[in-house]
Amino acid sequence: MKKLLLGDEAIALGAIHAGLSGVYAYPGTPSTEITEFIQADATARERGIHSRWCTNEKTAMEAALGMSYAGKRALVCMKHVGMNVCADAFVNSAITGVNGGLIVLAADDPSMHSSQNEQDSRFYGKFALVPVFEPSNQQEAYDMVNNAFDFSEALKVPVVLRIVTRLAHSRAAVEVREQKAENKLSPSTDQWVLLPGIARKKYVDLLNKQSEFIKASENSLYNKVEHGGNTRLGIVACGIGYNYVKEAAGDNANILKISQYPLPEDKIKALAAENDAILVVEDGQPVVEEGLKGLLGAGYPVKGRLTGDLPRTGELTPDCVAKALGHQCGAVYAPAKNLAGRPPQLCQGCGHRDVYAALNAVLAEYPDYRVFGDIGCYTLGALPPFKSLSSCVDMGASITMAKGAADAGLFPAVAIIGDSTFTHSGMTGLLDAVNDKSNITVVISDNLTTGMTGGQDSAGTNKFEAICLGLGVEPEHVRVVVPLPKNMPEITRILKEEIEYNGVSVIIPRRECIQTAARHAREAKKAKEANK
């Protein structure tokens, strides 16, 4: 049977059919739809597959490890920067090993469509010394999940499944198979304790598996050689880049398609021996290009992003690959010069707008103020018409950056952070500020959801006052307001009072996201009509 699926949906369905027992994730584009698909799937609900959102990627990785140690198959999903958050648990999991199959799904975002950077998650696989799978299309994405679970269980290691935005958010017909039953509960009798004496032995075990990983790559169905007869330039095509190569070169090229790592060294050396040079086509950073330069030596010409044959930044396109292969491309259509730029803006009626309007009104009285921002739709407060934010670096950084600036003597130092981001990684920074009695004002702009990624549940909903009090913020300096234009006098008064307070204060503007409010209203109306 065939289904029309997004790449994300193909991975989700592949995991369900492969005997998944739990998905652990924090929402982040372009990975979000994987967990949402599992949450909505009838089979997953019937089987009781765990699919609640986690507080952050680290807790997701650790919970998935626990499920794996108990013998069941677990999937961890995140966008590429989430790998930074879960890195401690992820890298150490390579040394502990796993029991039930464990896949770490990393969705990279070349061109930074909705991200802070273009980091390439294949580096994490190399860093942790674990295999990486990289599908080139939706069918491979579906099939690979089952293969990766089997591989993980056979060799007792976590594996990385790396995709990119273009694959995650495009559709194709996928042939689906019958679903497997879940693993039975079978807690491992191995020791998962990384005391140095144990860790040293397990690290040697991991190193000894590297030859098995390479052998698996050499024999992988996903790493294949195609002979086209043109020996002037061989092509190494990685993941989704294979599609662009086939579109540009057809059958008239010697191609080594790579979708499983570590690199299949013998296949690469054979390709090099048959061709005068090699072009590496990979979406992301020059991971393979650098590997080939080391493998083949300085005298062998390896081309790609580092040599300028492909752009150093941004995602691949059929045109840039065709140009690298020496083909003439048609004219590229540029935007009309007389069109004004249309940067993204906060929704009309959004509570964040009222927060920024109040902040700007109050802070205009302070010549040296800085507002430290965070990751969420409220980051758009950095753009016109508000232009309120001075920084946005990573999840949770607003509070700790404001603290550091206050430590340096800056006044006023204001942090603005969303509800989901606060529980993700802002709480520890607030505890530091409380312990240091830092002179900062923290605004937790609570729209009762994870708004930027589509309205998923937020871990701290209805708990923020209790969390702040538990972390030690003085009760009289935890203030809640409703961000509406009619309440502007009250909001500005409270902001002024808390800025002038010499210590840690928290203001919580709370009003539901208008997008989720509208959705909830539609659902309520539909339910009411169904009950008539």
Image (cartoon, grey):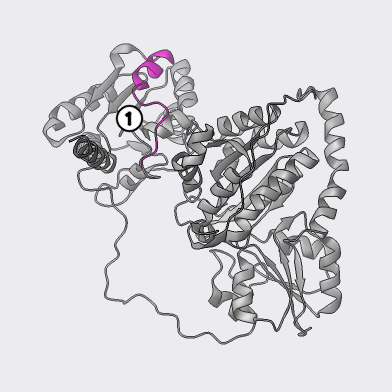
| Label 1 Cα crowd, 10 Å radius (few <14 / some 14-19 / many 20+) | many
Magenta region, residue range: 455-473
In the rendering, at what x and y percent does residue 300 appear?
82, 73
| Viewer can see residue 297 | no
What is the quadrant of the C terminus in the image?
A: top left
Q: Quadrant of residue 261?
A: bottom right
In the rendering, at what x and y percent does residue 335 appear?
35, 75
- Whether residue 329 is situated above or below residue 341 in the rendered picture: below
Q: Secondary structure at mark 1?
A: strand
Q: Which secondary structure type mostly characterizes the magenta part of the structure?
A: loop
Instruction: State the residue position of label 1.
Output: 443
- Whether residue 335 is situated above or below residue 477 in the rendered picture: below
Marker count (numbered) = 1
Q: Is residue 425 toward the left or the right of residue 183 in the image?
A: left
Q: Is residue 78 toward the left or the right of residue 525 in the image?
A: right
What is the quadrant of the N terminus in the image?
A: bottom right
Q: Who's the residue at 59% across and 73% down the image?
A: 244
Q: Quadrant of residue 292?
A: bottom right
Q: Quadrant of residue 264?
A: bottom right
- Whether residue 269 is situated above or below residue 250 in the rendered picture: above
User: Within the magenta stretch, is there residue 423?
Assistant: no
Q: Is residue 57 toward the left or the right of residue 219 in the image?
A: left
- Whether residue 172 is situated above or below residue 158 in the rendered picture: below
Q: Amino acid at mark 1?
A: Val
In the rendering, at what x and y percent does residue 209 appear?
85, 43
Q: Nearer the viewer, residue 433 or 141?
A: 141
| Viewer can see residue 156 | yes
Q: Nearer the viewer, residue 209 or 519?
A: 519
In the rendering, at what x and y percent does residue 449 appear?
35, 35
